[in-house]
C-alpha cells in the first residue's frame, strides 16, 4: 500500500493522544510539517521537544490556515464548538477527522458543518492510557491497534479512502462502523468499565471520608480495577454526557448482573455462584485473547 503524503497537518490538542499521533505521523513520513494547536503551552512545548510537531500556536485560524489534514484531539463536547470557529478558515477540500470516543451526534453535526466545503469523517483509534498530557506521549501507541472510522451517506468516497490510508499508515487496523452502532458497542466495552471504575473508587473514597482506613490495605485487585479511574476527567465527563443514552443502557444491564450475583450471595447459592463464575471466567479468557 502506498502511503499518503500531506504537505501540512494540523493537530488540534497536543495532549497524550494528539502528541502520540504526531510521533506516529513523523515516524511514518506522512507529511512535510505538523502544526500543534493548543491553549496549553506546556503541552505544546513538550510536543515540540519530543519532535511530535514542527511548530505550534494557540491561534486556531493561523494553525489550520494551510493544513490539508486537520485532526481534532480534544474533548468531545469541545470539538464541535471549536469546529464552528474555524469552518470558514479551513482550506477548500481539506480532510478533517477527530479521535473522540463517541461518534453519533458528533458525526452528524460535524458533517453538516463542513459539508460542501471540506471533508469530515469520524475516527476513533482504540488505544490510549489513563495518563494525560504531552509528556506522557507514547511512540508506537497506534501500532497494531484498531481504528474505527464512521462514514455516513453524505461522506465522500474519496474521504473514506483517504482517511483509511492515513490510519493504516500510522500502523492502525481500520474498521468501518455506523456511528450509532459504534456508540452502542463502546458504551459496553469501554465506557461502562470507566463508569464502574469511577464508582468503585468513589465508594472507597466515601468509606475513607467516614474514617474507615482502607488505602494502606489496597491490594493488586483494587489497584488494577481502579487504574482507569485516573483518566482525564474532562475527557470522560464529555464521553459520559455525549453518549448518555447508550451508557445508561449499559449501566442498567450491569445493574441486573450485579443484582443476580447479589441475590446468589445472599441466598448462599454455592452452585449458582460457582457456575456463574465459571461462565464468566470463560468470557474473560476470550477478552484476554483479543
Image: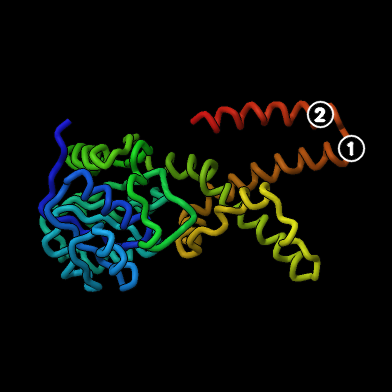
Spatial CA span between label 1 and label 2: 10 Å
Seen from this angle, which residue lies furthest right?
Answer: 267
Task: Give residue 258's position: percent from left, percent from top.
Answer: 73, 43
Q: Nearer the viewer, residue 122 or 190?
A: 190
Please tell me which residue is depicted at 71% across the width and 41% down the height of the picture: 256
Please tell me which residue is depicted at 51% across the width and 45% down the height of the picture: 190
Please tell me which residue is depicted at 32% across the width and 38% down the height of the picture: 172
Task: Give residue 131's position: percent from left, percent from top.
Answer: 46, 58
Q: Colour mode?
A: rainbow
Residue 83 visible in the snapshot: no
- Viewed as shown, does residue 62 lie left or right of 173? left
Secondary structure state at the residue bearing disc 2: helix
Residue 280 visible in the snapshot: yes
Secondary structure state at the residue bearing disc 1: loop
- Viewed as shown, does residue 14 lie left or right of 32? right
Instruction: Name the residue carrying label 2.
Output: 272
Q: Are marks 1 and 2 in contact (CB under 8 Å)?
A: yes
Q: Nearer the viewer, residue 106 or 271?
A: 271
Q: What number is the disc on residue 108?
A: none
Q: Nearer the viewer, residue 107 or 222?
A: 222
Please tell me which residue is depicted at 37% across the width and 65% down the height of the picture: 78
Instruction: Name the residue carrying label 1.
Output: 267
Q: Is 113 situated above or below 158?
A: below
Count of numbered marks: 2
Task: Give residue 109's position: percent from left, percent from top.
Answer: 32, 55
Q: Is 62 situated above or below 33?
A: below
Amino acid at each position: 500500500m502506498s502511503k499518503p503524503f500531506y504537505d501540512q497537518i494540523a493537530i488540534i490538542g497536543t495532549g497524550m493522544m494528539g502528541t502520540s499521533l504526531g510521533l506516529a505521523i513523523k515516524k511514518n513520513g506522512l507529511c512535510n510539517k505538523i502544526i500543534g494547536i493548543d491553549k496549553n503551552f506546556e503541552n505544546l512545548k513538550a510536543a515540540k521537544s519530543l519532535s511530535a510537531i514542527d511548530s505550534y500556536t494557540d491561534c486556531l485560524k493561523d494553525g489550520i490556515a494551510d493544513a490539508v489534514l486537520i485532526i481534532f484531539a480534544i474533548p468531545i463536547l469541545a470539538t464541535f464548538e471549536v469546529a464552528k470557529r474555524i469552518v470558514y478558515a479551513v482550506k477548500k477540500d481539506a480532510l478533517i477527522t477527530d479521535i473522540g470516543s463517541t461518534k453519533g451526534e458528533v458525526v452528524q453535526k460535524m458533517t453538516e458543518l463542513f459539508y460542501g466545503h471540506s471533508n469530515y469523517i469520524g475516527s476513533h483509534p482504540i488505544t490510549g492510557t489513563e495518563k494525560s498530557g504531552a509528556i506522557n506521549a507514547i511512540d508506537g501507541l497506534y501500532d497494531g491497534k484498531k481504528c474505527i472510522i464512521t462514514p455516513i451517506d453524505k461522506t465522500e468516497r474519496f474521504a473514506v479512502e483517504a482517511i483509511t490510508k492515513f490510519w493504516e499508515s500510522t500502523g492502525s487496523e481500520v474498521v468501518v462502523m455506523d456511528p450509532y452502532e459504534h456508540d452502542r458497542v463502546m458504551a459496553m466495552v469501554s465506557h461502562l468499565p470507566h463508569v464502574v471504575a469511577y464508582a468503585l473508587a468513589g465508594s472507597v473514597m466515601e468509606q475513607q471520608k467516614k474514617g474507615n482506613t482502607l488505602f494502606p490495605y489496597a491490594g493488586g485487585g483494587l489497584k488494577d480495577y481502579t487504574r482507569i479511574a485516573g483518566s482525564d476527567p474532562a475527557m470522560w465527563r464529555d464521553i459520559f454526557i455525549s453518549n448518555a443514552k447508550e451508557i445508561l443502557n449499559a449501566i442498567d444491564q450491569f445493574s441486573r448482573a450485579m443484582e443476580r450475583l447479589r441475590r446468589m450471595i445472599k441466598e448462599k447459592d454455592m452452585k449458582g455462584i460457582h457456575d456463574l463464575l465459571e461462565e464468566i471466567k470463560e468470557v474473560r479468557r476470550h477478552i484476554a485473547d483479543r
